[in-house]
Amino acid sequence: MLWTDFFIPTTKETPKDATAASHVLMVRAGMIRQLAAGIYSYLPLGYRTLRKVETIVREEMNAAGAIELHLPVLHPISIWEETGRVAAMGDVLLRLAGPDGDWRSQTVLGPTHEEVITDIARAYLKSYKQLPTNLYQIQHKFRGEARPKSGVLRTREFLMKDAYSFDVDLDGLDRSYQKMYDAYCRIYSRCGLPYAAVEADSGAIGGDASHEFMVLTDAGEDFVALSEDGSYAANVERATCRAAEAESDPPADLAEVHTPGAGKIDEVCRLLKVTPDRMIKTLIYVAPATADAPATTVVALVRGDHEVNEIKLDKAAGRSLELAPPKVIEELTGAAVGYAGPQGRDYGAVRLIVDRDVTALRNACSGANRTDYHVTNVNPGRDFPVSGDGVTVADIRNVRDGDLAENGSPIRLRKAIEVGHVFKLGTKYSEALGASYLDANGKARPLMMGCYGIGLNRIVAAAIEAHHDDNGICWPVTIAPFEVLVVALDPRDAEVMQVATTLHDQLAAAGIDVLFDDRNERAGSKFKDADLIGVPLRLIVGKRGLKDGNVEVSVRREEDKRLMPAAEALRFAVDFVGQASAGG
Ligand code: ATP
Ligand code: MG
């Protein structure tokens, strides 16, 4: 491909507010162009890489026995109502606008396809003899992301590979899940991504177990907890650590202390001369009424140096909680916000959820339920219950850097990009949509399901996050838009053009994706563009080198340049690409 025949609008301009390197470099390299917030066009160079990722994903899915199909983007909202996910999805579910009763107002854009695939399963997967089956597609998803950001890392329209497995039972699901997990590992390795598989929360999808595939980089929005010995890895949303050891000091008498104007932990600590780990934070939540349960107030306790993990808290409560408005807090405690404590209250109508580490404390401090006062020597079990009706003890806090994993290894928190997610769904969707098969005894059973998603655009951006330098992208060969770049330094020189054109043609004939920079530009700007677009191997043909019969060969990721005759450069390039594609 000749540069002058292709379309590579590189630019020096950096998008405003861009923080992620992938965002800046994709725009500058002429790979993408933003049309509106969270909506991007893929320009030819960007599209080539996206297609390469797509090919790798498709090859590995097929190799793992999954079967490709294609599902619609437009869904009748009725199918989302069948699973009750219209509410769970909230604003993420995008609807077409139309007058009442019109088909448009009853239609949504698919943010994911569990409902649609389960509709197919209920129609066709009727016998155990058809199982296991795994169906997948590569399709655009539409989500009303509130804060699209970082270029194509989080957009409102994106390309996802989503696969769905159907099995007779849990053992079957475990096998299907493992196959997808292994296929995902191969996909990321082939894309040249340094990744970690971590335990994950299952979110709105529900189900029993899931793993996320993460690329560790500061551009990520997720946090993962990794133990130093490498034995534990989990998304912070669900990561747990070793519980604090129970303290053994003898309980002293409760004492009220005047702490005027000190409604915040650090202010109280200064006045009481204690560290935040001696404090009990009392947070008040409300559980709005649902079809099955009335509205309830929930008191949650964590240590002063810990943060509540609302996903864990909701799980412990068995329902979705919201922080209580000041009025509710003031009514419950009889004090201004900032002075709540767990002591001196009947739990039952008001639920109490205590973090494990709070139960280990002796003679702690908390709010006094009286404005401008705190109490010292608060003791779990004596001053507030840790068992009985309406009381739950659970792990409801976020792990912190330095906490210990269960095996004692220190936990480190790292930022990461989620590039894929595998879930064991169980029978959540098959039961909601009535998708059952007949077992060997003719008995109807719900299909056992798993689902497996990969964000293709995120792989592209995450690969850039992992592989770039100050000058531009350093593509892994497997997903580079072009594998080899031939640069003619003096395009007006007949010999230079002849040697460069021959190299280009020979490489193309050898099946290599080769780009030929035949532009009439200064060498400096050609080198700048070459660095920016990140083609892994460069063959530079110039008058000076040719005098000695040489072409300059340089690898994008290496400093070294080598000189060799054109025929040798050709062999070098073919070997380089061959080895990289084979994983070498
Ligand atoms: P996130 O937590 O980042 O919002 P998610 O958990 O909602 O993602 P899934 O529903 O698990 O995402 O989707 C599967 C994959 O699709 C993700 O692992 C990610 O790679 C990709 N993906 C999800 N949302 C987006 C988005 N808004 N833009 C680009 N890719 C996305
Ligand atoms: Mg996810």
Image (cartoon, helix red, strand yellow):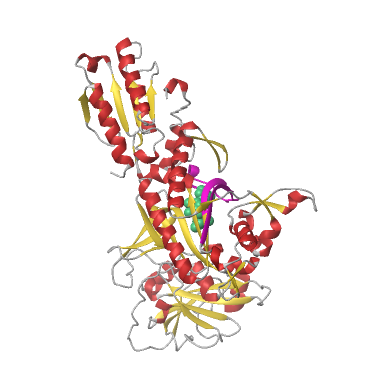
Residue 482 visible in the snapshot: yes
Q: Which residue is drawn at the image coordinates 73% and 53% (left, top)? A: 106
* In the image, residue 95 above or below residue 362: above
For residue 450, above or below residue 357 = above
Side (left or right) of 240 relative to 117: left
Q: Is residue 188 left or right of residue 496?
A: right
Q: Nearer the viewer, residue 128 or 314?
A: 128
Residue 5 is one of the magenta-drawn residues? no
**Quarter of the image where the C terminus is located:** top left
Q: Position of residue 435 (x, y in %)?
A: 62, 66
Tally of numbered discs = 0
Looking at the picture, tell me which residue is in the foreground, 158 or 144.
158
Q: Position of residue 576 (x, y in %)?
A: 28, 35
Quarter of image, res 474: top left
Q: Where does the N terminus fall, quadrant-wise? A: top left
Write the residue at 45% across / 62% down. 177
| Residue shown at the point (37%, 27%) measured from the top left | 508
Residue 78 x %, y %: 71, 59
Query: Would residue 98 be found to the left or right of residue 450 on screen?
Result: right
Please indicate, yes or no, whether residue 217 appears anywhere in the rendered image.
Answer: no
Q: Nearer the viewer, residue 437 or 428?
A: 437
- State the extent of the magenta-drawn residues as a range: 133-162
